[in-house]
Image (tube, rainbow, N blue to C red):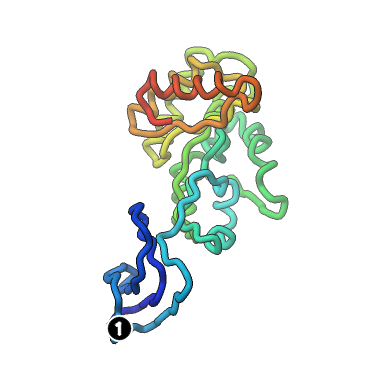
Amino acid sequence: MYDLIIKNGKIVDGTGGPWFDADLACKDGIIVDMKKLNSEQAGRIIDAQGMVVSPGFIDSHSHTDFIAATINNSDSRVLQGVTSEICGMCGRTPFPIGVKNIEHLKNYITPFIPQEVKCDWNWSNIGEWLSLIEKQGHSTNIGTLVGHGSIRIAVMGYANRKPRNQELEQMKTLLREALEEGALGLSSGLIYPPGIFADHSELTELCKEVAALGGVYTTHLRNEGNELIEAVKEAIDIGRLRGCPV
């Protein structure tokens, strides 16, 4: 006997092939059969006639990290079929927290947090943030990048200049620690401060750490207007020089 049977749906299995008619059976939270089930019994049977049955969708560009530590549900996502989210986009993440520049980080992030959400900021790095999410639970699976803007703020605030050698090493250390603690890669937001102050050499040097630990680089491009082609070329060049996916 199964725990659940979903009958009469059009199955889209995520492999890229065409949909097919089948029933789907689950036991102990795992799909164990995908075929026409006629007389089999289950604790619960759902008739999906006229509907599509598919794996959960992945939202590959999410800003859930701004509120996930405070609000542990994403009903709006689940109701759209989204079961996994990749957040930490556009260079903005609520970690790492540099004690001397925490107010700068709050100013950087807070405009994206709904006013009714009270953020405790009771973590200092991505490892502690992920542990908090895991402890309280969340209605979607969450993976996250670490933001270049947040790393830069932790080390040098909103300074409009190249990082000094010691500052760049501090940024690389924070990035490396974030990747080791679970970050999937580095994101940048080069169209607004402080990302706009970072030049090609700074980003390339940081992406050396990303490549070494198997991460990816994602970017909110430096320009979306007349210099769009140059902005795309910059992103591609960073990945080409350091051998990391963009």
Q: Residue at x 38, y 77 (%)?
A: 7
Specify the amino acid type for callout 1.
Asn
Q: Quadrant of residue 213?
A: top left
Rendered position, 27 above or below 122:
below
* Residue depicted at 61% across the width and 22% down the height: 196
Q: Position of residue 98 (x, y in %)?
A: 55, 32
Indicate the quadrant containing the N terminus: top left, top right, bottom left or bottom right: bottom left
Please state if 200 lies on the left or on the right of 29 as rendered: right
Q: Is residue 73 visible?
A: no
When asked about the image quadrant of residue 31, the answer is bottom left
Circle 1 packing at 10 Å, graded few (<14), some (14-19), many (20+), is few
Name the residue located 52 percent from the left edge and 31 percent from the top edge. Answer: 219
Residue 187: x and y in percent read 50, 33
Res. 44 visible in picture: yes
Q: Residue at x 40, y 81 (%)?
A: 45
- Quarter of the C terminus within the rendering: top left
* SS label for mark 1: loop
From the image, tell me which residue sits under label 1. 38
